[in-house]
Amino acid sequence: MTAAAKAPRFASVDALRGLTVAAMLLVNNPGDWGHVYPPLLHADWHGCTPTDLVFPFFLFIVGVSIALGVVPRAEAGADRGALMRVVAVRALRIVGLGLLLHLLAWWWLEMPHFRPWGVLQRIGLCFLAAGAVALWLRPRAQWALLGALLLGWWALLAWSGSLAPWDNLASRVDTALLGPWLYQYDPTTGRGHDPEGLPSTLGALATTLLGLRAGDWLRRGELRALWIAGVAALLLGLLWSQWLPWNKHLWTSSYVLWTGGWALLALAAAHVLVDRRGWPALGRSFGVNAIAAYAGSAVMVYLFAALGWWGWLYQVAFAGWMTPRFGPYLPSLAFALAFVGFWWAVVRWMDRRGWHIRI
């Protein structure tokens, strides 16, 4: 690879990715799901809690990473077809890893059915589509596609006539495609729902494309554009929510702009603090081993749960002595923080040895 083709590396992006992964582990692994502080739970349906920012942040950073990693190589003259094959192979690996994790969960935890959709599957699909967009569409066309996704997904949801659970367009299409293999399925009514299903991936792709454009601004040093776009997206997302509510399950267009606005501002702030002012890149160790940390922690959870160690560990190390003193919520949070701390130590150890596992 020539010097001109080398992709720029921003410590701020690694840090922001890492903090996002740490937040994923935190909200996914409380000690007791019956006692979780409300900000650490997803909104039941409409709405947006701090937890509902986590997955959009990660997909936004996927787009940023494509702008920083794939696009410079294409602009330096690398064969775009070859780059597309690299993107496609990596996307398939991410999807395959997601399917493998769900297979382990189904097998070890004796789940009622195997679930094809999931977080990694959505990441892989968005990475594939956004990579193709980055390689084959010019910036104006990328903006046009982003606008078409936002308006088109809104029109489809409005045309379907309902945003209610089970009755919305996304749930109906997912039910027709996979039925009882979805995250939720009611055999008495034959209706199902999956928060990572196929139709709502249109909104998730819009989030990734917003990250793609933000990454281009970052690469070109256009910090002012990041700040302005962040504020504009927040205001538009807030305004649009009066007609189309924020909804992570459906990944509504207003949700794309609201969460994307926060992601744009977070990226701008991280760039100023880490890249320009030299603040420590907190979270970097998670960021350079993001998929490994997510997948490794999932395997650990499945294994401990299958062996009966999960509940025992929580009771002995946290709930048994903390609950009488502090109530049930604090030990549940302490367990989640300890889980994140354990995996921070793991990825820190890996990073110090130069072990960066990429799918």
Image (spheres, rainbow, N blue to C red):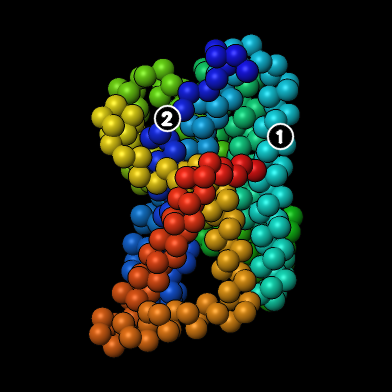
Element at badge 2? loop
Q: Is residue 49 left or right of residue 188?
A: left
Lower position in the chain sequence, tag 1 or tag 2: 2
Quadrant holding the C terminus? top right
Residue 211 is left or right of residue 129, and the answer is: left
Residue tagged 1: 88
Judge by depth and name the residue closer to the eye, 1 or 97.
Answer: 1
Q: Amino acid at mark 2?
A: Phe
Which residue is identified by label 2? 10
Viewer-closest of 281 and 230: 281
- Image point (63%, 77%), residue name: 306
| Quarter assignment of residue 255 | top left
Figure label count: 2
| Residue 70 falls left or right of residue 281 | right
What residue lies at 58% left-to-right and 82% top-to-bottom?
A: 308
Q: Nearer the viewer, residue 86 or 349?
A: 349
Percent x, y of residue 337? 38, 64
Residue 251 visible? The answer is no
- One can see residue 79 in this view: yes
Vertical arrangement, residue 317 with respect to residue 200, above or below: below
